[in-house]
Image (tube, rainbow, N blue to C red):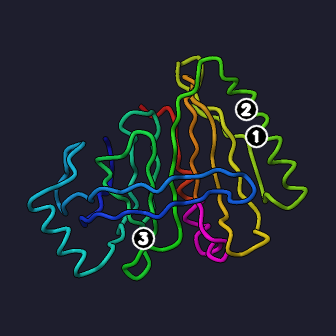
Amino acid sequence: MKFVNAPRTSMAICLFTLIMCAMWSGLAFAGMSLPRLPIPGKQVEKGVSGSGAASEESRAAKGRKGHAALKEAVTIMHPERNFRVTIPAGWHSGDVNNIRAIGHEFQNVVGGELGGCVFGWTIEPMVKSFPAASSVAAGLKQDKERIAIKQVVSTKRRDQGDPKKKCSFIGWQTEEAQRPDPTYNRSIFYRGYDQDNVSYTFGAACQDTKFEACRNDFMKIIESIQFCVK
């Protein structure tokens, strides 16, 4: 695991279940428990969730501050897949040294409490015969059509890497429009497949009433996702 500007506090949280693209797209993220942050001034070895002094500091930090936010942006390299993403300052990152293989979630912090802005991803290997290129083309076409009926604000094709160099990613990125009911969730997502037909869904979502406050951070995160970085 590689990271820069490591967070300076330690704690454990469990995020709520996030329903991405509710009512329209049906995409869902299951809530996941996030492990502890690294101890200030130390780099925790990959896979170590923290115990002893780390646990004591976690309890002390929680008592003083509640949920601590990153003071600086942190760039995370996935431990198994060839991509990285940057989580902005003001967010709680979980344990950057213990990212879950198939999915992970992050949430912003407001006044020491977890806010309503959430980002997460899911990863799922597909069978070799799965038509990834057709899936991306169909998804992009559908989201372009959804612009006309005001379900989507914008969508674009977003490919990365070079198949000739044995690393590539094909996908599309979409920002949803204002919801008919302000209590519905609204999202920006990036979906696609790598050269091995592994499916990725990156989603940033919140309740529609909070979307404008979350949007800048959402765009920073989604646009920071880079494949073929190893």
Q: In this rendering, is residue 112 above or below 192?
A: below
Numbered label attached to residue 139: 1
Say what secondary structure mark 3 lies in.
loop
Tag 1: amino acid: Gly
Residue 197: horizontal and vertical position, in percent? 58, 25
Q: Residue at x 15, y 68 (%)?
A: 57
Rendered location of residue 177, percent (x, y): 76, 63
What's the magenta region? 205-219
Q: Position of residue 69 (x, y in %)?
A: 36, 70
Magenta stretch: dominant secondary structure? helix
Residue 41: assigned label: none
Q: Quadrant of the C terminus?
A: top left
Q: Are marks 3 and 2 in contact (CB under 8 Å)?
A: no
Q: Is residue 61 left or right of residue 124?
A: left
Occupied quadrant, residue 156? top right
- Circle nearer the viewer, 1 or 3: 1
Residue type at the position of mark 2: Ser
- Label 1 crowd bin: few (<14), some (14–19), many (20+), radius 10 Å: many
Alpha carbon distance from label 3 to label 2: 35 Å
> Looking at the image, do the residues carrying marks 1 and 3 touch, with CB atoms under 8 Å apart?
no
Instruction: Please report contact status of discs 2 and 1: CB closer than 8 Å, yes or no.
Output: yes
The local secondary structure at tag 2 comes to: helix
**Residue furthest to the right:** 148
Compute the Cα span from label 2 to label 1. 6 Å
- Residue 90: give its label: 3
Q: Amino acid at mark 3?
A: Gly
| Residue at the spot 53% in from the left edge and 24% down from the top edge | 167
Q: Residues within 10 Å of mark 2 (few under 14, many from 20)?
A: some
Q: What label sits on residue 135 in the rendered view?
A: 2
